[in-house]
Amino acid sequence: MGSVDQDWCDTLRLGFWWRSFFTFSRGYEKMKVQRLDRCKDTQKLIPFISAGRLRAESTESFVHGSHLDIWWRCLRCSKVFTQSCRTGLFTTQGAFKTYRLFGAVEDLTLKEWWLTKGHETFGESITTLQVTLYVKRKNSDALEITVDAMQQVSSQLAGKEFGFWLDQICLLNSRQGLLSDAPLSWPIYRSRIALEAMSQLLSIMEIHELIIRNAPQTCLWQIGEQLKLNSKAMTKGDDYPSVIADKHKAMGQTVSSYLKKGRCLVDNAANGLFPKY
């Protein structure tokens, strides 16, 4: 690649690692801090939730870093979903159901989408009652649900919210266990696929799309080296040509594997199956 393309890749790599450092490298710490922050944020919203006057502007922060955020990003990456939203023609019932949930996401930031559509659909899931644990007991139809309840919340509201969460958890346990089975469960949803893994796949897809659009001659191994996706396939200055060729092949296969998995995630999400490779 020439110097201009190299600079372009370097810029994208910097942006990629800047966005993803805390997600990939410090996910556990972020999760703990995020939970504390959201608990404090929820306390501030109690009067508005109790009065039924919760506004989109005050709830947008809850979406960032959630499974709902990842699902939305998947739809942004789906060219088929984008085209279907433009034409109004959907190839599957699942795709149309997803459209009814999210609406069109093309050219919208997450904040813009939440303010115009997201809060209307998913805002009722932000409750004063905080579900901290839910498990289905073995050899029984019983569910164990642990919640944090604020003292200043009325028993009537707490009971209503518990009923809401019980319904969502029952939906999750009666089907495949996908978020798409119970979309309103997004604040408490736990996936077998790590959020960090899905976020990484989407970031790689987004970066690949940008690079190919601006430098179409770029090889997959070059993208992989820029993002350091396979440490064993990174070339060194003293490598023999045959070794370099083998490493380029291995790195290209690594990137191809990431892209294939990411596309499966995106395609399934657009057809109403999320999260699923």
Image: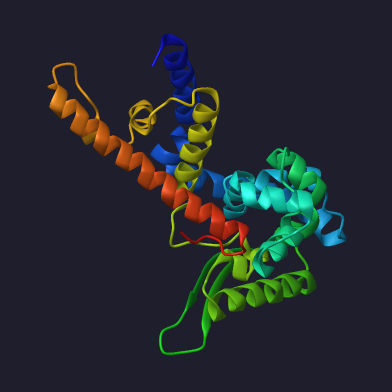
Please tell me in which quadrant of the rendered image residue 172 appears.
bottom right
Query: Please, is residue 12 above or below residue 119 in the view?
Result: above
Query: Please, is residue 261 above or below residue 150 in the view?
Result: above
> Which of 39/175 is in front?
175
Q: Residue 133 placed where, x, y %?
A: 51, 67
Side of 152 where 237 appears, left or right: left
Residue 244 in sight here? yes
Q: Residue 253 placed where, x, y %?
A: 31, 42
Residue at image location 82% in from the left, 61% down from the top: 50
> Which of 260/26 is in front?
260
Residue 72 in sight here? no
Side of 175 where 158 appears, left or right: right
Residue lying furthest front: 217
Residue at image location 62% in from the left, 53% down from the top: 68
> Which of 149/28 is in front?
28
Please tell me in which quadrant of the rendered image residue 254 appears.
top left
Q: Residue 249 placed where, x, y %?
A: 25, 36
Q: Residue 164 placed where, x, y %?
A: 70, 73
Residue at image location 41% in from the left, 89% down from the top: 139
Side of 245 where 26 appears, left or right: right
| Colour scheme of the picture | rainbow
Residue at image location 72% in from the left, 42% down from the top: 106
Query: Please, is residue 71 above or below residue 160 in the view?
Result: above
Quadrant assignment for the N terminus: top left
* Badge count: 0
